[in-house]
Image (tube, rainbow, N blue to C red):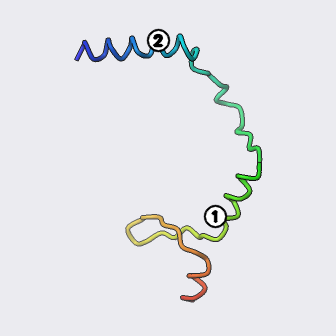
Amino acid sequence: MGHALTGFMNLTDRLRFVFGPATRLDTDAPVVHKHDDFEQASDEDLSHFVVETDSDGHHYGVRREDLEKQG
């Protein structure tokens, strides 16, 4: 196991040399959403779904139009 760990550590050292150190961002900073065309299209696609929960606590998505047909 020690040989595998040493090999992994050597690999990460080489990757750090090539790509630079890992970026450490401010974890307290708020997430900034860009609201680009892709995100707007995704929001539009997801707006057609409702999240339902069954008796076992499992969550799943249901199309709004299918709920309207049942109701």
Residue sitting at the far front: 18
- Secondary structure beneath dot 2 equals helix
Q: Earlier in the sequence, mark 2 or mark 1?
A: 2
| Type of amino acid at the residue the image marks with label 2 | Arg
| Position in image of residue 49 (x %, y %) | 60, 70
User: Residue 37 location, x and y as percent?
Assistant: 76, 52
Q: Kindly check if marks 2 and 1 are in contact, taking CB atoms under 8 A apart as contact.
A: no
Return the residue at label 1: 46
Question: Could you tell me which residue is drawn at 48 percent across and 66 percent down?
Answer: 60
Q: Amino acid at mark 1?
A: Leu
Q: What number is the disc on residue 67? A: none
Q: Which image quadrant is residue 63 in?
A: bottom right
Q: Residue furthest left?
A: 1
At x 71%, y 52%, the residue is 38
User: What residue do we see at 65% from left, 25% from top?
Assistant: 25
Residue 17 horizontal/vertical position (percent): 53, 10
Q: Which residue is mark 2?
A: 14
Above or below residue 49? Residue 12 is above
Does residue 13 appear left or right of residue 47 in this picture? left
Q: Nearer the viewer, mark 2 or mark 1?
A: 2
Residue density around tag 1, few if under 14, some if 14–19, many if 20 or more, within 10 Å: few
Question: Of residues 36 and 58, which is closer to you in this image?
Answer: 36
Percent from the top left, x then y, of residue 67? Answer: 57, 82
Indicate the quadrant containing the C terminus: top left, top right, bottom left or bottom right.
Answer: bottom right
Location of residue 3 (image quadrant): top left
The number of numbered badges drawn on the structure is 2
